[in-house]
Image (cartoon, rainbow, N blue to C red):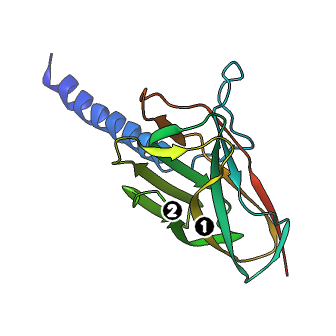
Amino acid sequence: MNQKAINFLIPLFAIVVIIESLVLVAKLTQKPAVTSVKISTSTNVVSKLNYKWGINLDTVKTGVMTNVPLLLTSVDNKVGVDAIDLYINYDPSIAEVVDVTVGKGLPVPTFKKINKEKGLVVLNFLMSDANGFILNKNVAAELINLKVNFLKEGTVDFSLGEASLVVENTSAKVLPFNSEKLVINVTR
């Protein structure tokens, strides 16, 4: 290959690499879409667990600090849980999660983060007890309690993200669950 061809190809190759890098960075910085109306595992699998919001609140006024508990119930008796990962989505322009407290019987989360810009709360629990965290049939266990401040008028949804999971103690399998979304209308 002659010197003129090499002198032309090297800058061309560098430009292609720079453009591909910019495209990759742009894709990585895009916000993921929150599309979690109702999360349920496969329709062919019977759900063993049910997440429910432990508050019956349709409307709240701006500036009011409210506790929003998340409960977990089991269809079967004495279900041992080894790990719980919670990813909770909400609209940060309408609500602000100020703090998260953990329910009785659960350990301190191995990871806990409130991302106020993205409207995401992440908690990861790993049980150290040999039997795990025990859930009894139709007995609601309070997992967490969100302390929420409502910032402005509008409608805000609190829902579990698709990455949420519960791992069974005896089988180390991910248990199927149902969850509901909490919808709150915020007024002045």
Q: CA distance from mark 1 to mark 2?
A: 14 Å
Could you say where residue 65 lies in the image, as x and y percent from the top left?
68, 80
**Amino acid type, mark 2:** Lys
Could you say where residue 110 lies in the image, as x and y percent from the top left?
36, 55
Q: Which mark is residue 104?
A: 2
* 1 or 2: tag closer to the N-terminus: 2
**Amino acid type, mark 1:** Leu
Could you say where residue 15 lies in the image, as x and y percent from the top left?
33, 38
Q: Residues within 10 Å of mark 2 (few under 14, many from 20)?
A: few
Q: Is residue 28 left or right of residue 91?
A: left
Could you say where residue 166 lies in the image, as x and y percent from the top left?
51, 39
Q: Secondary structure at mark 2?
A: loop
> Which image quadrant is residue 45 in?
top right
Q: Secondary structure at mark 1?
A: strand
Q: Is residue 5 above or below residue 50?
A: above
Query: Between residues 152 and 97, which one lies in front from this camera angle?
Result: 97
Query: Between residues 80 and 177, which one lies in front from this camera angle?
Result: 80
Query: Measuring 74% from the left and 50% from the top, which residue is drawn there?
Result: 181
Quarter of the rendering occupied by the N terminus: top left
